[in-house]
Amino acid sequence: MVVVRLTRLGRKKRAFFRIVCVDSRKKRDGSALEILGYYDPLKSEDKFKLDMEKYNAWIEKGAKPTLAVENLVKTLKEVKK
């Protein structure tokens, strides 16, 4: 099964995340099928970017987003309103 989830980058106590599509059996930081965007919790502006066309295409193909990714997508939609 393909999932849309966060993969951790950055250094100690300075986390940076990529939003990726990956096989659910892979490790958290394993190889991704496609990179959809990023999330930087430490920034005050431009915290995250997500390519909604790619995201929607993967969801239509049956990919399941994690709870954290679902919450990011909800906040992104609220910001764009």
Image (tube, rainbow, N blue to C red):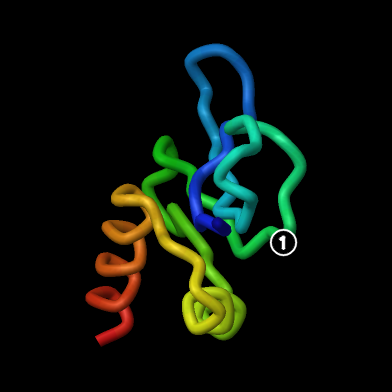
Q: Quadrant of the C terminus?
A: bottom left
Q: Measured from the top left, where is residue 33 in percent x and y?
A: 74, 57
Quadrant of the rendered image containing residue 41: top left
Q: Residue at x 61, y 78 (%)?
A: 54
Q: Residue at x 58, y 32 (%)?
A: 28
**Left or right of 35 in this view: 64:** left
Depicted 76 relative to depicted 81: above or below: above
Task: Write down the residue under mark 1.
Answer: 34
Query: How many badges with numbers are in the image?
Result: 1
Q: Residue at x 62, y 64 (%)?
A: 36
Helix, strand, or loop for circle 1? strand
Depicted 27 relative to depicted 23: above or below: above
- Residue 41 or residue 72, whichever sits in front: 72
Q: Quadrant of the N terminus?
A: bottom right
Q: Measured from the top left, where is residue 27 in percent x and y?
A: 63, 30
Mark 1 is surrounded, within 10 Å at the Cα level, by few (under 14), some (14 to 19) or many (20 or more) other residues, namely: some
Q: Name the residue type under label 1.
A: Glu
